[in-house]
Amino acid sequence: MSVDSPEQLRGLRRAGRVVAETLRVLRSVVAPGVSTGELDRLAAETFARHGARSGPILTYDYPGSVCISVEDEVVHGVPGRRIVREGELVTLDVAAELDGYHADAAVTVPVGSVDQGRRRLMSATRAALAAGIHAAQPGCTLRDVGAAIERASRRHGFSILRELTGHGIGFAMHEEPTVFNWAAPAARARLTPGLVFTIEPMLTAGRPEIVLGRDGWTIRTVDRAPSAHEEHTIMVAEAGPVILTAG
Ligand code: MF3
Ligand code: CO
């Protein structure tokens, strides 16, 4: 969507705060021995407490309130009986709807202590997200955003999983435009004030190719290398990007 009133911005900010709060709750309980199903139940409780609903359930009838992807799972991991173990990376991807407004954010967190390669992957992914957000200035293009993400990833020595993208958001969870994590030549439209979209780089140390799992939802790396994913919903304001899911 493109925000055209203070009321719309207030609505989006409220949805963004529920997403941020849910991520805070979930990341605080990630520890060796916790199941992804328990994390999902906590997310459902947090949504209910705020009168919010799960974006994935609302939009796709997804079999969980949030997506939880472990290690080589990149996105759309289905929560369930899987127990997370010391040394693994867990991606918590939370999208919520409140009073008709949608927001979406994700973080990758370590379970206990993780090796240096995984720590580097996490910080590279955070740096790529920060670079993408910084590039989302009015008058710039989505291609500039993608180019900044790609540069930051390369600089840290990791690859972007190019098939996965960010997206417009607001009145629905998935809207136009597609937000590429690389300098896609077609992404030439200028960013206008009010435009709302997600920026969500997904990085791997391995081969940058993905496959869809047998459950029909979970997307993982083809070579089983771990991956990381960081996401915010932002609005392009006159003065620059505003993060709506920062809490
Ligand atoms: N936050 C996720 C995304 O933008 C939500 C996925 S919903 C699913 O892709 F149903 F596709 F898993
Ligand atoms: Co998203």
Image: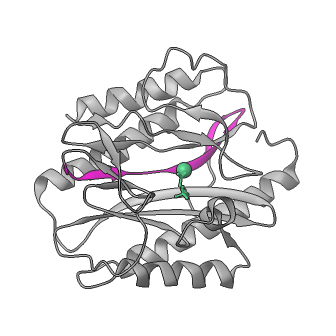
Check the image and report above or below for 31 versus 225.
below
In the displayed structure image, the side of residue 71 where residue 125 appears, left or right: right
What residue lies at 30% left-to-right and 34% top-to-bottom?
153
Picture coordinates of residue 186, whole percent (x, y) = 56, 16
In the displayed structure image, the side of residue 146 where residue 3 appears, left or right: right
What residue lies at 48% left-to-right and 50% top-to-bottom?
231
Name the dominant secondary structure of the magenta segment: strand
Check the image and report above or below for 35 versus 118.
below
Is residue 215 in sight in this rendering?
Answer: yes
- In which quadrant of the rendered view does residue 114 lie? bottom left
What residue lies at 46% left-to-right and 28% top-to-bottom?
146
- In which quadrant of the rendered view does residue 26 lie? bottom left
Q: Which residues are magenta?
A: 224-242
Picture coordinates of residue 29, whole percent (x, y) = 37, 82
In the displayed structure image, the side of residue 144 where residue 33 appears, left or right: left
Picture coordinates of residue 154, whole percent (x, y) = 26, 29
